[in-house]
Amino acid sequence: MLTRWFDSPTWSGFGSELSVLRSLLDDDFSTFGNRFDHIFRRSPGLSVPRVETTDEPEGVALRASMPGVSDAGLKVIVHGQTLTIKGEQANAVPEGYQVLLRERNPVRFQQSFTLSTDLDGPRAQARLENGVLTVRIPKRPEMQPKTIDVKVS
């Protein structure tokens, strides 16, 4: 069984004051993330793409899910040590068609990431394929592993 440190008998002497404080904190922190969900997930027109980053030998790869986003509606910007992804997914209606019901609104998003100083932001490359944006940011040459030959004297 796992016990939080403040549930141990050592802390029982603090009485109901501690349990009241603990319940207030538990309630507030357990719902803290939910307070912002409605802004990003449920509001029409605003979204944040799901992102995965991996550390690779030659740099860092960032992959973001962007289903339905075209390259025309996508910008990847590196400014100093900040990488920003901006995008828009429009709901285009083909010529000659009429919308009868629209439950999907156009989506706009922007997400920024701070790059560590060992990454070479200006050399970043981006590729959109099958609804996944992959941004590769190489490590600075002086930060990449280097094999040193050992000379025998």
Image (spheres, rainbow, N blue to C red):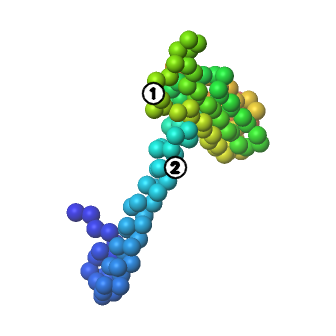
- Kindly identify which numbered label has been placed on residue 68: none
Asked if residue 89 lies left or right of residue 38, the reply is: right
Q: Amino acid at mark 1?
A: Leu
Residue 74 in view here: yes
Residue at the image position 59 percent from the left and 27 percent from the top: 90
Asked if residue 48 lies left or right of residue 18, the reply is: right
Q: Amino acid at mark 2?
A: Ile
**Can you tell which quarter of the image residue 81 is in?**
top right
Q: Are marks 2 and 1 in contact (CB under 8 Å)?
A: no
Distance Cα–Cα, label 2 vs label 1: 24 Å
Of labels 2 and 1, earlier in sequence is: 2
**Can you tell which quarter of the image residue 141 is in?**
top right
Residue 59 in view here: no
Residue at the image position 56 percent from the left and 11 percent from the top: 96
The image shows residue 3 at horizontal and vertical percentages of: 28, 68
Residue identified by numbered label 1: 101
State whether residue 98 is above or below residue 29. above
Residue identified by numbered label 2: 39
The image shows residue 61 at horizontal and vertical percentages of: 58, 32
Asked if residue 141 lies left or right of residue 33, the reply is: right
Q: Which residue is at the front of the view, 13 or 66?
A: 66
Q: Residue lying farthest top?
A: 96
Residue at the image position 22 percent from the left and 63 percent from the top: 1
- Label 2: how many Cα within 10 Å (few below 14, some 14–19, many 20+): few
* SS state under label 2: helix
* SS state under label 1: loop
- Label 1: how many Cα within 10 Å (few below 14, some 14–19, many 20+): few
Q: Which residue is at the front of the view, 122 or 110?
A: 110
